[in-house]
Amino acid sequence: MAAPATDKLRRSPPSSSSKSAVSPVPSNSTTSSLNSQPDGLLSLPPSTNATEANPVPQSGDAALKTKKPTMTSRISGMFSRKEGSDSRESSRINLADKIPEGKVANGTSTKSKFGSDKKREAASQPFRRFWINEDGTHEHHLKVGKRQEKLSDMFQNLMTGKKKEGNQDEQPLSLMANWVDVMRNEREKLAEQKNSTNTSQTLVQKYGKCQEVVGRGAFGIVRVAHKTDSSDPKREQLYAVKEFKQRPGESTKKYQKRLTAEFCISSSMQHPNVINTLDLLKDDKGLYCEVMEYCSGGDLYTLVLAAGQLEVTEADCFFKQLMRGVEYMHEMGVAHRDLKPENLLLTQHGSIKITDFGNGECFRMAWEKEAHMTAGLCGSAPYIAPEEYVDQEFDPRAVDVWACGIIYMAMRTGRHLWRVAQRGEDEFFDRYLEDRKEEAGYRPIEVLRRRQCRNVIYSILDPNPTRRLTAHQVLFSEWVKEIKVCRAGEEGF
């Protein structure tokens, strides 16, 4: 097992009276300005999550006598059993405490013998996307329809100028940044594509008629195909159909080679946390279409966007599922190279599905033992690893792991850590490189309550890829081993 990061890093609880570096806000935009305080420090918005509260700092002689742990001692404890106050602290933090007694739902729509009284009680309760059961297990109930309603309201408010005072969405690097422009473009393209819903008879016969658009990108669009269940006419089978567009100036030969390569990679993956790819067909316009399983829970990006930030147990569950999928891909000799929340789909019950292998790369054939290095810059700026900017060749597996660390921080804080992980090009990344060597650490990561969690994130985001943890090592760290995954995440439904 490769040794984790060894640069000197010590932890000390942040003091309310001390200056602290602040977290940037995650974003798809790279053009918003950086807002800084007069002393050059950025401000971190207050967290709404009780488990992210800062620990109580020591005072007086006790604080002076406390020995600051070194980077080696902190990281070396990553794979060892938690002891003492850390364990007691985590045992006190239970999301179930936030749920009033008698309010635990079962996530089903079965009829109750209590009739209308039960229905009225359910209707009066607010919708909850996540909860913890009395036995310690947890469940997700994701309704993309409700999420779209909320996002639509947010879009309308932004368009009409109804913005709340102190709205954090305007801060640099927020997930909301550039979202209005994206929504405008989506509406314009949707209007253009409204009448363009023809599909080939073969596609219709096998998978049903393609209807609403659920995704759009440089590749084309993704529609939902509805096919009546032959055994029960009242039921429908749903499929996601991804349309591949030919790029400007791209020859037919290169077009076919590109989409065939993506289909070969994605269709060879069989894992609960990787999308199930079923078929590759041509429509009546001559465009190739990839047929995949349909995930009714939407994507992780819109979930975080609508929620602001996820609950700790909720984010941990998604993270462990993601790392399992990444470990499986790497074992198969495939690197994704474009991991981001937009490419992580969700089922209604909370199973993560890695999708979009357009930038996927085979770094090792079945008969080979050593991995091939790769080259070239690809992916989305906030998730690209620093070595892609400076090294001629690099390990694509380390690139995927780096992106997973950024995704986790986005889930927990609703922010990206920086716009681009390039020294001298991004103030936030430069601050991270300096602060990770200091006693207090990097403030946006230090707000994570659990020591073991922080240590793993620091090691995932090690700027030196040779010291960075592998997906396998992440899964076997003490923190991730203790994460409980929901049943849907375990079984992939």
Image (tube, helix red, strand yellow):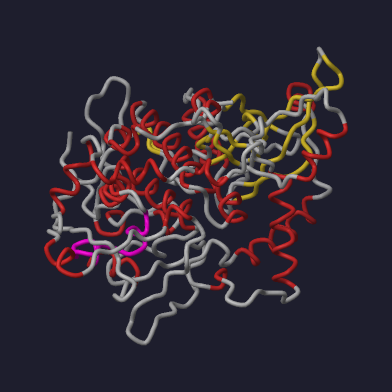
The residue that appears at 43% across and 46% down in the rendered structure is 93
Instruction: Specify whether residue 445 is painted magenta.
Output: yes
Q: Residue furthest top?
A: 231
The residue at 67%/36% (across/down) is 296
Whole-percent x, y for residue 263 in the image: 53, 31
Is 87 contained in the magenta span? no
Range shown magenta: 435-448
In the displayed structure, 429 sits above or below 8; it is below
* Above or below, comparing residue 58 to residue 354 in the picture: below
**How many dots with numbers?**
0
Q: Residue at x 33, y 82 (%)?
A: 40
* Quarter of the picture holding the C terminus: top right
Q: In the rendered image, which quarter is residue 161 located in? A: bottom right
Q: Is residue 420 left or right of residue 63?
A: right
Residue 236 placement (x, y as % from top left): 79, 25
Percent of width and height locating residue 173: 48, 67
Q: Quadrant of the N terminus?
A: top left
